[in-house]
Image (tube, rainbow, N blue to C red):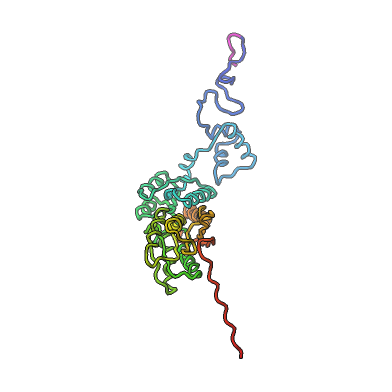
């Protein structure tokens, strides 16, 4: 052992560690530069092989419980975290799911994002998020997530372009649409049963003996608005009543407000309005009550869609439709995870049921008159 010239004691290195030696508690070399701890250092500190460390931190790896405890204890002392990027180069799986979602201006999109991220995490993946304004280039956003070598892409509440789907196909990356569908049955898509919501809205308003109907649409070429409108109009038409008037509200408060004022200016103004979203329904209710001095539901019944938080506020008490967003997100992620393992699955387009949430913005159903007794005389 090398001695100090002055007192003959052992020579010391940094932090009292023998020069050129190792820290007994960590196994790191005294001459090692500060930086990222490697799996080899963890293996040495735990007294196991480097492959045992890799298996400990691998999703599908196996080690004994005793080995796992030793590796995790050593990793904790050293401050080690596995290098996901390096592992992805070996496995050719990034464990990343690219989520391209509409601009988070509405509470429904925020709820959808939270539930989607939770479902992605529960499936063992991580989320790479891109939020897309209505005017943004969707193709560029899809390409940006593909560039990160994601394992799959979910497009949520955004209008799909043929170019975006081609980008995923060329990169051999599976794509799932959520809260959207396209006419092309070659796509995987999970969404709410919007046509059924339109039918249920019409039946509920018909049950209250309404005779003049209107529909406030969202963005004209979005499948959600189109399907709600189709179910609503077809059911009203089948009842033999005049076709509902239709206005566009662009899924905004101001749009719903303006559309309602326009509808109520007609000489044959509607006495029942179905809106493709709650935020438009709230705008319509404010126009009807505050601008025109009419009553909801006495003069006009209003139904919305999405069951946003504001719908339950006492000042609105909006009758609306609720969707199990959590189930929709879990189904989308489960489908995508299956496609990552087996990309040749047949395209699936699935709908999640909707439920009518009754509040006070719609008149109660008309009670049928009881049958008159038959005169037996």
247 w.r.t. 55: above or below: below
Is 11 covered by the magenta stretch? no
Is 246 or 169 nearer to us in this picture? 246
Magenta residue span: 1-6
119 w.r.t. 65: above or below: below
On the image, the x and y values in percent for residue 213 come to 43, 67
The extreme right residue here reads 66
Q: Quadrant of residue 19 in the image?
A: top right
The extreme top residue here reads 6
Quadrant the N terminus occupies: top right
Q: Is residue 40 left or right of residue 215?
A: right
The extreme bottom residue here reads 377
The extreme front residue here reads 293
Residue 60 visible in the picture: yes
Q: Quadrant of residue 62 in the image?
A: top right
On the image, the x and y values in percent for residue 369 come to 55, 76
How many numbered badges does the structure rendering display?
Answer: 0
Residue visible at 55% across and 34% down?
80
Residue visible at 59% across and 34% down?
76
Is 214 or 51 nearer to us in this picture? 214
Residue 188 visible in the picture: no
Is 4 covered by the magenta stretch? yes
315 w.r.t. 368: above or below: above
On the image, the x and y values in percent for residue 33 come to 50, 25
Quadrant the C terminus occupies: bottom right
Is 87 or 221 nearer to us in this picture? 221
Q: Quadrant of residue 15 in the image?
A: top right
On the image, the x and y values in percent for residue 139 come to 36, 50
Magenta span: helix, strand or loop, mainly? Answer: loop
């Amino acid at each position: 052992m090398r001695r100090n010239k002055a007192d003959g004691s052992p020579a010391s290195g940094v932090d009292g560690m023998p020069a050129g030696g190792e820290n007994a508690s960590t196994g790191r070399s005294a001459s090692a530069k500060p930086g990222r701890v490697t799996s080899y250092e963890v293996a040495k500190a735990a007294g196991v092989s480097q492959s045992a460390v890799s298996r400990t931190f691998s999703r599908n790896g196996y080690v004994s419980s005793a080995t796992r405890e030793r590796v995790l204890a050593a990793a904790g002392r050293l401050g080690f975290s596995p290098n996901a990027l390096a592992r992805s180069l070996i496995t050719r799986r990034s464990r990343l799911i690219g989520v391209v979602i509409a601009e988070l201006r509405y509470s429904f999109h925020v709820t959808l994002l939270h539930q989607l991220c939770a479902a992605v995490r529960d499936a063992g993946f991580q989320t790479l998020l891109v939020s897309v304004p209505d005017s943004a280039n969707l193709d560029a956003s899809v390409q940006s997530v593909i560039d990160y070598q994601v394992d799959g892409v979910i497009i949520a509440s955004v209008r799909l372009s043929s170019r975006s789907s081609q980008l995923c196909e060329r990169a051999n990356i599976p794509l799932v649409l959520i809260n959207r569908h396209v006419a092309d049955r070659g796509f995987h898509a999970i969404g709410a049963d919007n046509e059924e919501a339109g039918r249920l809205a019409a039946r509920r308003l018909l049950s209250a003996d309404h005779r003049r109907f209107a529909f406030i649409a969202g963005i004209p070429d979005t499948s959600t608005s189109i399907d709600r409108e189709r179910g609503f109009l077809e059911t009203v038409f089948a009842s033999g009543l005049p076709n509902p008037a239709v206005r566009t509200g662009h899924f905004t408060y101001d749009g719903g407000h303006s559309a309602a004022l326009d509808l109520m200016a007609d000489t044959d103004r509607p006495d029942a309005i179905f809106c493709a979203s709650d935020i438009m329904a709230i705008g319509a209710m404010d126009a009807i009550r505050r601008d025109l001095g009419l009553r909801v539901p006495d003069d006009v019944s209003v139904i919305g869609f999405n069951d946003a938080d504001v719908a339950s506020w006492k000042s609105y008490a909006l009758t609306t439709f609720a969707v199990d967003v959590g189930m929709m997100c879990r189904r989308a992620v489960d489908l995508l995870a299956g496609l990552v393992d087996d990309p040749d699955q047949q395209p699936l387009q699935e709908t999640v049921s909707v439920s009518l949430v009754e509040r006070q913005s719609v008149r109660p159903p008309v009670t049928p008159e009881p049958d008159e007794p038959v005169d037996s005389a």
